Amino acid sequence: MADTMVWTLGSYDFLANNIEPYTVSLNRGWRLNPVILPLGQGVLVNTTPKRNAIPLNISGRISGTSSANLRSKLDTLTAILDDGRQQLNIFDDRYINVTPQTWQIEFIRGSGLQLADFTIDLLADEGVWISETLDSSDYTTNTTPTVSNGGNTSTPIKLTITAPSGGLTQFISTNSTTNKILTWDGNLLVGDILIIDMGTMEITEAGLSTLDGFSGVFWEINSGNNTLSFTSTPTGTAFTLEKRDRWS
């Protein structure tokens, strides 16, 4: 577990600039309806509920040794906010993706230092904190690995499969713990790469994004240990599994 609070927004380090953003408020919520992706042959329903985007508010105080110094700090912070979607870190081991919405500056008169209070309204993508550590493991198909999610909410995985000698015509991934299955059928040549990204709900075949040959659902792994199963044609195909723990 981390024991360091870092307070960064993108490349902007609040503490290094002697800024005190010590108030953060979040309003959590759920989007309980499933995600529906339209396909040429009908519709695909992803039955895993996703967390809703949530409003997040940061407030604090900026101090400057002079008016020019205060203005410089404000200009730098505004430039970061103008860049749009950012990674917010409060603790050093996890982050949340946010998009600035509005920000407000209130100048304070009558003090020795030049002071300004600020309020920044952000919108978090889906209301979960994501581990800074990317877990990556190599496997072959016809195995049933146990994969652990150290967070307290479900998290997606990303599979990168290299077509072996003879090519690749099928890859089936199953989370036996949640009884969710994703099947890909196609025809890749030896050395071609198949990427199945459960988080973005995308499949890439030899560099081309497509959902042809896809059936089932994009699934996630629950908190704790999950028993997974992978099969392919041909058997024994090598692949890499990547995931990051998540917290609600």
Image (spheres, rainbow, N blue to C red):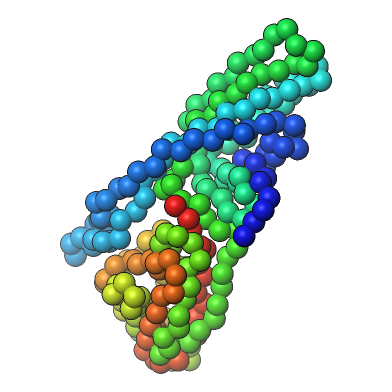
- Give the image location of residue 234, x and y in percent: 39, 91
- Give the image location of residue 202, x and y in percent: 39, 63
Name the one closer to the observer, 179 or 183.
179
Quarter placement of the N terminus: bottom right
Q: Residue 6: which quarter of the image?
A: top right
- Give the image location of residue 173, x and y in percent: 36, 78
Total tally of numbered discs in the picture: 0
| Residue 144 at least partly seen | yes
Q: Residue at x 56, y 50 (%)?
A: 95
- Give the image location of residue 132, x and y in percent: 60, 58
Q: Residue 181: which quarter of the image?
A: bottom left
The reply, left or right, for residue 126 in relation to residue 22 is left
45 is higher (above) or lower (below) than 170: above
The residue furthest left is 42
Q: Residue at x 60, y 23 (%)?
A: 118
Name the one closer to the observer, 36 or 127.
127
Q: Residue at x 50, y 32 (%)?
A: 57
The reply, left or right, for residue 176 in relation to residue 189 is left
64 is higher (above) or lower (below) than 125: above
| Residue 160 at least partly seen | no
100 is higher (above) or lower (below) than 156: above
Q: Residue at x 51, y 70 (%)?
A: 242
103 is higher (above) or lower (below) than 31: above
Name the one closer to the observer, 203 or 54.
54
